[in-house]
Image (cartoon, helix red, strand yellow):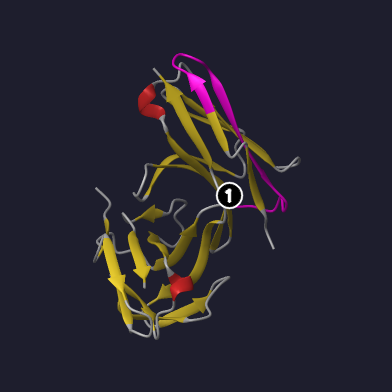
């Protein structure tokens, strides 16, 4: 069974810093990997999706990379802002199921 | 714009009650999912459905059942609620052949 791990569980950085969130998965036979943002008490908002054949995807200040062979994905956030404060989750898709990490809680201090 | 809605944002029920959580999507998606989310455990799949009247167990189906009578609606049923079912419940949908899952806002269920 696929296991997805996110490290660190929590991260606090000053505004303006660039940062990297990590996601690792045990089974490299994935269809895609998706990064989500979750605000407190809310549902999940999709940020980026990387298909298994891709190496990275970019949207604005966000860049996600995927290395299937090593079972790793990273989410890079450039020039962080207080509005980026949220929990970030990654999910690895295995045919019809998605396996989630437990998330990294990010706090960006003004 | 894609939309997944859930019937309640917050729900408080007593132990032993039968609880219905409703999820509706307006995207004509074939696949629908129910997850629960607990601190430190991430999202865990309870049940999913890939077509009307079709369902499959996820990783933690015990104590739950589901119903999908119409394509747009997927219901999660707690036959006899227990305190260990206090959690955030999230519904999602995905088009067959599509890549992304789309989530509803979640229902925070408290069982006392």
Q: Please tell me in which quadrant of the rendered image residue A10 appears.
A: top right
Q: Identify which residue, A69 or B96, lies in the foreground.
A: A69
Q: Identify which residue, B107 or B11, lies in the foreground.
A: B11
Task: Name the secondary structure under disc 1.
Answer: loop
Residue B42 visible at all: yes
Figure disc tally: 1
Marked residue chain, label 1:
A
x%, y% of residue A36? 45, 43
Residue at figure coordinates x 47%, y 58% from the top left: B37
Where, quadrant-wise, is the N terminus of chain A in this rendering?
bottom right
Q: Is residue B81 magenta?
A: no
Residue B24 visible at all: no
x%, y% of residue B96? 44, 62
Mark 1, residue position? A101
Q: Identify which residue, B3 or B13, lies in the foreground.
A: B13
Q: In the image, A85: left or right of A94?
A: left
Above or below: residue A58 compared with residue A89: above
Where, quadrant-wise, is the C terminus of chain A in this rendering?
top left
Q: Identify which residue, A67 or B80, lies in the foreground.
A: B80
Above or below: residue B30 compared with residue A55: below
Q: Is residue A15 magenta?
A: yes
Residue at figure coordinates x 60%, y 37% from the top left: A54
x%, y% of residue B42? 54, 54
Above or below: residue A24 compared with residue B70: above
For the magenta stretch, what is the residue range?
Answer: A12-32
Q: Residue lying at the far top in this picture: please name it.
A: A16
Residue at figure coordinates x 55%, y 62% from the top left: A97
Q: Residue lying at the far right in this picture: please name it.
A: A70
Residue at figure coordinates x 29%, y 69% from the top left: B12
């Amino acid at each position: 069974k696929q296991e997805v791990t996110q490290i660190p569980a929590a991260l606090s950085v000053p505004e303006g810093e660039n940062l990297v969130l990590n996601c690792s998965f045990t089974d490299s036979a994935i269809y895609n990997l998706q990064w989500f943002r979750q605000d407190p008490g809310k549902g999940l908002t999709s940020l980026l999706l990387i298909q298994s054949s891709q190496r990275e995807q970019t949207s604005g200040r966000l860049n996600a990379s995927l290395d299937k062979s090593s079972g790793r994905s990273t989410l890079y956030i450039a020039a962080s802002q207080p509005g980026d404060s949220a929990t970030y989750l990654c999910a690895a898709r295995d045919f019809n199921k998605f396996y989630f990490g437990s998330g990294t809680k990010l706090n960006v201090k003004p | 714009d894609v939309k997944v809605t859930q019937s309640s944002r917050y729900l408080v029920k007593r132990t032993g009650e039968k609880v219905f959580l409703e999820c509706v999507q307006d995207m004509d998606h074939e696949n629908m999912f129910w997850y629960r989310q607990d601190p430190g455990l991430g999202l865990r799949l309870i049940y999913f459905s890939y077509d009307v009247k079709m369902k499959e167990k996820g990783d933690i189906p015990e104590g739950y059942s589901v119903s999908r009578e119409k394509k747009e609606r997927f219901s999660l049923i707690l036959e006899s609620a227990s305190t260990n079912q206090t959690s955030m419940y999230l519904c999602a949908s995905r088009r067959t052949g599509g890549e992304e899952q789309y989530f509803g806002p979640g229902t925070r269920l408290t069982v006392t």
